[in-house]
Each structure stands twice: as structure tokens, then as C-alpha cells.
Amino acid sequence: MALTIISLIKQVPLPSEMRMGEDGLMDRTKAKSIINIDCQFGLEAGLQLRKLHPDARLIVCSMGPKSFEASLKTAISMGYDEAYLLSDRKLGGSDTYATGLAISTMLKHLGFTKESKDPFIILAGRQTSDGDTAHVPSQVAENIGIPQATFVESVKADGTGNVIARRIIEGGYQMLKLPLPCVISLTPTGIPPRKPSLSGAIKARNLKITTFGIDDIGLGTEKIGINGSPTIVAKVINIVSERPPITMSEGNSEASLVDSLIANLKKGGNVLEKREKVVKKEIEHPDFPDKDFRNGARGIITWAEVTNGKISRPSLELLTPARYLANQLGNDTRVLTLIIGKHVEPLAQTLIEHGSDEVIFVENNRLEEYLVLPFSSIFKQVITERRPEIALFAATTAGRELAPRIGMKTDSGVTADCTGLEIGEYVDKKEKVIYKPILESRRPTYGESKLATILGFVCPQISTARAGTFEVPERIEGKQGIISEFKPVLDENDFVVEILNTVRGEGGLQNLFDADIIISGGRGTTTDNLNLIKALAEALKNQGVNAEWACSRPVVDEGVAEYARQIGQTGKTIRPKVYIAVGISGAIQHVAGMKESEKIIAIDHNPKAHIFHNADFGIVGEYTDILPELIERVKGGFKFGIEAREK
């Protein structure tokens, strides 16, 4: 039985060419497009798998307008055999739920179901640059009913009907064994995608791409398109930076440049007050009747992720917006938290003291480590019994694959990577009603240049919150609440994925959320494997300063540092007193993770680097010259104005 390798790709617009239409939504019609970067790594992973299975069949699939044929032909020119495009105007405006449903329906139409006798594997990119949700791979897997692994760096077949995947997790990685068929989503840390070949280009020119409409695959319109999707983009508004002009160091040598920086810091300079301004219009509020769409669903549920026997900080952060939303909803709205694992009952009181009204715990030795299949099944069972109106997850690697799988189980939409959550209302001029109360989930998008408000019309309304965005609520020791055990029905089929090994880094990674100073290295500092970045952090620690080192996404993608160290839109959001960006170009995705720092110092050899537009103090120079000078000053007692910790 020959293996079939299916790669899902998406053609995405260049963010710099996106424009906002008069309706407040994004217009991509005139923007140049490319194959999504993460999808390119998925394509290459498929080609690498065929090296081990020379008789494998390589298929590439996409969903979108006819213009997507260009990307499908590129995949053919790289070495793929067949191409399929799902293209129908009725799919326009589909959210990720509807997209996952449509793509999986097309795959089923092609014969790829969990009952298939012939083995197959579905590969996809981790996420797309225009949405950054990372939802569709999980939704496709759930709809077909097969296992998955997301945020995967490498995948290989073991020759026994299984694949071995190395999956990124907070603080390290896991080695997983998955049976075929399965879905794997790839990060840009694997083998770089190859260039199309001449013979491949000739093949692509002559190949006819098979195009389906929704009628061809037997897909109705009830759950697709803008009208059938459980979520909608209510509005998109511009985010305008209000950072004051940078103060640059002056001097003719490394020593004088560092002297100038120290002098500028002593003067005080820029201080974080208000970092961004949202420009928006007043919303018209007609005299329509209210409509409550919740059908009796009430309350808020959060997930407490457990790592190394402790509740993760992002899970505790969730309790801040959960309590805020509960207070907005009123009527004694309760916050419920679900915690799953081995020996987790003692952790329940901690959640109560941080703001939960009730904690449901599930104890099972087989669930000591997170597994998406049993965890999503348990969550579905609890949601069915308790019927919450809102479900919140931290946007960790686990939360970002768990939430969309649950969303597909409950026919709910999911909003990813939120930085703001409010209870609001939606004026439906077509139905002439006002939906209220409704969850307004706000998330930066299109390279952090826009702020989108997403609304969900199916309960539970599901959102993931960007780690580091919300503060951990103050702990009230001795606070009372309800703690109860839930006995789920577990299916052996949910344990088909085996964790072979879990490797987590040193405990200092948690300190990124608490550090007073963070020194972060970018692509320009990988020549010495970030040794100077780490040395500056260590010198500050030796002076009693709570300091840590971090990095930008390209450093993680190159394999120089682990994902847990990544700052940015797809990494951590931090708020240190001082953030030192070294060799970082200043992409807006990275700025999203560090812009709330009290003071930002940028060091780069390029005087035109964008990072200087998002910093308070700057030095133009080679980091290999500047950092040794800074390290010596720190050894001499300079601490960037930060007081040493008490010992």
C-alpha cells in the first residue's frame, strides 16, 4: 500500500500591500500574493518524506479563488504530482471553522477518511501570515476524525505505519509517535523549501489542476461563507504608534557610544505612558430590539494547563479577563476552571485563590502530560454538561491546538491570540436586531498593523489569549470556592498518540515574565550563537539584577534558541523595565511582544533599521563591539538604572 502525502497550502497577500476598504474590512484584491511561508516548509517536509517512500503519491490542495492556481503550480514544479483547488464564491468570507470544514470535506470526497485502507498523512503550515490563527490543521484533523500534532519541527516515518514528530512546547520539545492517518502542521524550523526545478516548471505548465465547487464535493451552504461561519470580523481598525522620538547615542568609538547611552539613561528620557492609539469611528446605534443568542448558556470556563506539576502562568493570567467578563455580564456570572492531569486536585485551591469560583478537576495517571485527543474529548463532555457561554484558553502551543479542536466539536468559532476581551453588542441591520451580550474578542492582525474585533454567535464563544497580555490576578489566600471531580468517559482511540520523550529547558524561562531587564538577540546575533547576549544577561545577574535573555522568531526558526525564548506575536509578550534589542530588525510581529516595556534600547549596525522607530534609546554599531563594552560597564556596577534584588 503506497503512502499518500497531502500538503495543504494557502496563498497569502503581502501585509505591506493590504488596504482597508470603506466597510472597515481588509481588501486583499490588489495585493501581491505568495505561498504562505509556513506552508512552504510543509511542502518541503512532504518531499523529504518521499525520499523514504519513493512510490509515495504527492498531492497539494488549497481553497481559494482561481488565482490560487499559481501557488499550486509552484508546488507541482517543486515535485508534487497532483493539485486540487476548492474554489466557489459561496465560500467567500469563511472563518477558520468553515475553512477547516470545507477543506476536510474535499479531502473526504477524494477518499481520505479515517476508514481509508491506504495510509495517508496530511501536512500543513503551522499558521498563515494573514491570520496567524493556527486553527485549520486542528479543525481538519477533528472533522476527519484523525490524530494530529501541531508546531512540529520535523517528521519522519518509522516504517511500521507510524510517524515520529518533534513538536515544540513551552520550554522545549516533545517526541511523539502518531499512527497514520494523521495531520501534522510544520513550523519554519525544518528543512528550508527548495526552489522549483526546470523540469518541474515544464510539468506544472502542462498539468491541469482539478477544481471543485461545493456542489462537486457535497458541501452545503449552512456552515460556510460569511453567513454560515460561527464567527465574523465585525470591524478592523488601524493601530497608530505614539512612541516619542528615539534618543540616539553619539560618539566615534564603542566606549563613547556606551558613555552616551549611559548619560542619556541618567537623564531619564522616554517613559512608557501610552504606546498605541486606536483610531475608530462612533458606531451607529439604531433603536432595534435586543436578541439573546445564548440559548440558556451561562458562565465562563477556562483551562488550567499544568506543566511540571504546576499551573502555567498564562493559565493564571486567563483569570483576569475571565473575572472582568463575569463582572460585565453580571447576574452572578461564575468563573469555572477545568484542570486535567495526574495529582492535580491539590492545585485546585490555587485557582480558587486567584479568582475561579469553581474548579473541576479530572484525575488520571494517563493524562499527566497534555494530549490533544483525550483533553478535547473531556472538555467537550464538560461543556455539554455545564453549558458555558464563553471558553478561554491561553495561546500556548497546547492551547492553540486544543481550542480549535474543541471548537469543531461544539460547532463554535474560535478567535486566536487575543489582546483584549470585552462584553459588547452587535447591531445586525439586516435582521434589525441587536445581539447582546456578546463577546468582543480583539486581536492584532495583518502584521500587528490592524486591530480586528471578532464576534462569535455559537456558545461557547471560544478565544485564546496571548500569553503575557494580562496580569496574573492577585492571590487571596484562604478564598473559598467549589472544588469537584469530573469522571469523563475515556475512549482508548483517544490514546493512539504516544509521547516518546519530553524535554524542557531550565526553569529560568519562566523568569521572562518577571525579569526587570531582558536582552534579546535577533538574526544579526546568531554568528556567535547568542553568546554575547547571554553574557550580558549573566553579568547583570551577577550584579543582583533580575535579568534574562530572549530572542526573535528568526533565531528560533534557525534552531539557535528554543521557542520558549521567543518574543513577539507568535511568542511571548513581556513587560520588563528595560528591554535591550540587539541585532533585531524591528518587524512589527516582534514589536508586538515587547512594546509594553518601560524602556527599550536598540542596538543595530543598520541606522535605518525599523527597530529604531520603536525604541527609546539607540546605538548604531556592531553588536560584537558594543556588547563587550557594555558587559565591562555592568561588571563595574552599571545596571541600567535597575535596583539589585534583595538576597
Image (tube, grey):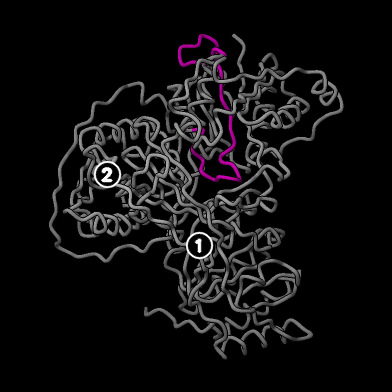
Crowding at dot 1, Cα within 10 Å, few <14 / some 14-19 / many 20+, comes out as: few
Q: Residue at x 50, y 62 (%)?
A: 280
Mark 2 to mark 1 CA distance (whole Å): 39 Å
Q: Is residue 476 left or right of residue 453?
A: left
| Quadrant assignment, res 477 | bottom left
Residue range in magenta is 110-137
Q: Residue at x 46, y 48 (%)?
A: 234
Q: Residue at x 54, y 61 (%)?
A: 592
Residue position for label 1? 280
Task: First in sequence, mark 2 or 1: give its number.
Answer: 1
Q: Position of residue 47 (x, y in %)?
A: 69, 27
**In front here: 99 or 605?**
99
| Quadrant of the snapshot with the N terminus | top right
Can residue 111 be found in the magenta stretch?
Answer: yes
Q: Are marks 2 and 1 in contact (CB under 8 Å)?
A: no
Q: Position of residue 330 (x, y in %)?
A: 21, 56
Taking 314 as reference, is 515 above or below it?
below
| Quadrant of the snapshot with the C terminus | bottom left
Residue position for label 2? 339
| Quadrant assignment, res 319 | bottom left
Q: Is residue 79 left or right of residue 348?
A: right
Q: Position of residue 95 (x, y in %)?
A: 49, 37
Can residue 312 be found in the magenta stretch?
Answer: no
Residue occupying the far front of the picture = 287
